[in-house]
Amino acid sequence: MQTRHIERIRNMKIYKTLLILTFFLLSPMLISAQEKFTISGTLKDGATGEDIIGARIAVLELPGTGAITNTFGFYSLTLPKGTYTIQYKSLGFQILEEKIELNANITKNLDLMPEAKTFDAVLITTEKENENVTSGEMSVEKITMKDIENIPVIFGEKDIFKTMQLLPGVKSAGEGNSGFYVRGGGADQNLVLLDGAPVYNASHLLGFFSVFNSDALKDVKLYKGGAPAEFGGRLSSVMDIKMKEGNMKEFSASGGLGLISSRLTLEGPIVKDKGSFIVSGRRTYADLFLKLSDNEALNKSILYFYDLNAKANYRLGEKDRLFLSGYFGRDNFGFSDQFGFDWGNATGTLRWNHIYSDKLFGNTSFVFSNYNYKIKFGGGNQTFEIGSEIQDINIKEDFDWYINSNNTLKFGGNFIHHTFKPGEIETGSGINFELNDIQQRYSIESSVYIQNEQKIKKRIVLNYGLRFDNFTQLGPGDFYTYNNAGDVIDTATYGDWEPVTSYNGLSPRLGITWILNESSSIKANYGRTYQFVHLISNTTATSPTDIWLPSSNNIKPEIADQYAIGYFQNFLDNKLEGSIELYYKDMQNVIDYRDGAEVTLNPTVEGELLYGDGRAYGMEFLLRKKRGAFTGWVAYTLSKTERLFDGINDSTWYPARQDRTHDVSVVAMYEINKQLVVSATWVFYTGNAVTFPSGKYEIDGQVVNYYTERNGYRMPNYHRLDLGITYSYKDYKTVKDVETGTEKQVPRKWESSWNLSVYNAYGRENAYSISFKENAETGETEAVQLALFKIIPSITYNFKF
Amino acid sequence: MKKAILNLGVILTGFGFYSCEKVIDIPLDDADRKIVVEAVFRDEPGSNYVVLSKTGSVYDDSNFEKISGATVFITDGSGTSTYLGELPGEPGKYNHPTFAVAPNTNYSLTVYTSTDTFTSASQTFYKPMIDSLTYIEQLGSFGFGTDTTYLVFFNFTDDENAENYYRVRAWVNGAADQNLYVTNDELFNGQVYTQPLFATTVEKGDTVFVELLSIDKANYTYFFTLSSSGGGDPFSPTPSNPVSNMENGALGYFGTYTTDTMTIIMPQ
């Protein structure tokens, strides 16, 4: 009896302790279960009405709490009931402070005014520009349109692609090559999105220009790694490009006239402050000079490209907004009327923003994208045309849920229907042999994702998410199976919409930012990505005639796992940003080709493919000065990227073609005064890995080169200096006030500037290709280097009104 | 077509884009010497040769060392061996004055040098027949030039009973055309096949001599990979060695071919 009584007492003590403990644990929750309200709205540029992306909203009374506007300018911040001073800030705009009494949910749609134009070269700011340190993002490069304006590039054209290639970890594919490489990945591993629509070939004229007319763009962000779960489908990077909406307040036109090309942008309101449009066009006319030629063939030749960007948007009330945007561009090359080659992209996006509540923002998109090319031989009725095409139709739904001040949840889904036309042939009536088209291929790529950004205390930002992808190849068609030698051993026929193969992939994403203090942080991330569409190209250079193929019963999806860690440190009160980042990327099911593979117009091209592994690792270093009269950056990348395939290079690791050990970019811009800006860019990189012969012999009376290892040699080092100078006319007039006699400065309606730039200022002959040929006279074999450019100057006149 | 794309690159560079070519110094490793066997046997008596040579350094002149005094013989399916003799005055080149391959037969080649033994196997198929040679007129040549040139087509009928591979060679006014034309019958088994000599420039009054060879799959693979093992220009595939049917590490090929020839003369 007694023991039981003692036990009961002991139990009661335990219960009491538990109760007290529970109360203490719960009490913070009880205390914080006080009322919370949400302040939300859209931030716009007060001068043009453009949404401001990535603006920061801070609460003076609660340091460390805040929000960022999303890609449509929407923000949402949940705080406990109280009185606050809210600060709205964004680079290039004046800080806006609003005192609010938060005792109910409030909507605050605000305009931020552009920074007052002072005539001092040095801008004074008291706010801490340390977003690169404190944000939860890493492995990301952002380019503002202002950065691009002053950087000298080839032919004087502002180009976001070329400017991106000056940042660490992003390597250009070289002169005359389209595309770029990010952290050792291939040129097809970059997802280039224009307002959400994928652009399959983002280069004009074999890579000398990008297809983006910078006048029509608002924001560009490149994820080199650690891309959030809303992105997938390409292993190496995501370049998310947003077009401008168009000035909602007044009509405006801007453009430029240059030696090689010209461009014009028109924008304005459809209904003031409710809807606007922007149309932007660009065309080169290098071929106009050909018309002056006496040679009849040259006379009839054409060489040009053009782009057209158009966008319209309309606000259907407080909570809804509609956007319609499109891009159309084409490159056209023709020699006499015997040979023609044209290619281009067309994209279209229809988007509907809806604000479901103060905390829930949603976007629905319908996207169309098409890339195709056509090559034509012959004339009259004896013509021969080869073409190839890839087309996507895409439906996307994305939600931003601002749960509370510490958690922002993004989730959504994506459904893409791909159509691949690897080779279509048309012969004129005068040709009497037939070649069959390569069968079209269809597939569906669908995904769902969820990602949360969580702030813990004031020091840690955690980003975690999960993405699920499914890729299903569909009929109709004949699907081949191959043996190890690449011969067809089986053919299976499927009907319309019948599933042939299906792949599933789960991609976790994880990122941690540990803020050490106001000016330094350590970040790390891990992410897995799947890629289901592959660019088939076995040539040394990328060419517009490379074809896209889907994953299939033979081609497995490519998979990449990337790990990165970085240290971010700002100096001189955030005037100087520094970062050092290390990464390691592991790739599976990477594609290479059998020796001498024929990939063009080959119905059994999948038999020419080999599959293996890849790995890339490196260190990226960046030091950047963003404010002041003198701005610019120094970027250095040390890296290695290799491949391993059975049967290539004796089944040992060999350098990938795009392996470049050292890559340096130095960019400097100096604002001498409000009217004169000079800039210089110096680029240096060690050469690509390349296969050169180690011997030669004779077959059939011809000398044949003998090769030992794959990519065992290097191209010569590449370096080049570009210079630029921009002279802007004064954008104000000095007017004497008649009554008071004082002088006043009145802004001018017509703004204009001249830009003079020199590409490759010291005329270095950088190797485009090296071939080993027999000298016709001496019979000796020599290494002949072809260089594309020496010094190229250009002048452009830019205007805006 | 690859040539046309290269032309695009040339044009872009040619149109005043300040491009230039120059000879540069690139140090290259010197690979160990390998032996090259080039063995060709036709179905015409005496029309055969085997050339034995060695590889050389890239920058040395192209006098490749020849291998003399080797034992070379070809054995047919029934085991009969025919020994080739070295031609006087042509060291490294071996020949049999009357030997000819027969259709639909398997052959093997054996080469004994002082240091190595090399073997290979090849087979012949039916004797092909060129139906006709035709041509069309065109302005300029592949988009270049403005003179009248001709595109010559060869037409023949494939035997549907087997997997066949073909090579076509052309001589224009006696000079051998170095372009390699090879094809297989996957797309036209048993049917008439028409194909242009699309990289061969033919002008008015030229005499074009065309030879059609029926080859085996290994030879097709060899010539196909030989033609695409690029010259280093950016529009060719990554350079690699052609896939040889020689055993034991020799470079080169062993081919036994049944052939047919035809001549056409262009109008003046």
Image (cartoon, helix red, strand yellow):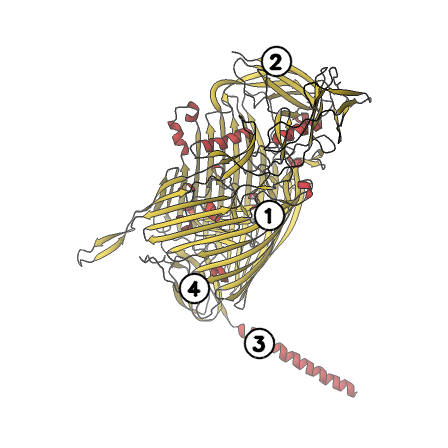
Residue A275: x and y, percent? 40, 50
Residue at mark 4 to residue at mark 2: CA–CA distance? 84 Å
Residue that mark 3 sits on: A27
In front: label 3 or label 4: 4
Front position in the image: A259 or A241: A259
State which tag comes first along the sequence, 1 or 4: 4
4 and 2 marks on the same chain: no
Gap in Å between the C-alphas at discs 3 and 2?
Answer: 102 Å
Instruction: Identify which amino acid the numbered label 3 is placed on.
Output: Ser
* Mark 3 or mark 4: whose residue is earlier in sequence: 3
The percent position of residue A233, horizontal first and vertical second, equals 58, 47
Q: Secondary structure at mark 3?
A: helix
Asked if one can make out residue A627 in the rendered structure from this viewpoint, the answer is: yes
**How many C-alpha atoms fall within 10 Å of the one at disc 1: few (<14), some, or many (≥20)?**
many
Which residue in the protein does label 2 denote? B263
Of residues A789 and B145, the one drawn nearer to the viewer in this rendering: A789
Both on one chain, marks 3 and 1? Answer: yes
Disc 1 and disc 4 on one polypeptide chain: yes
- Tell me, for residue A573, which label it has, or none: 4
The residue shown at (53%, 73%) is A32
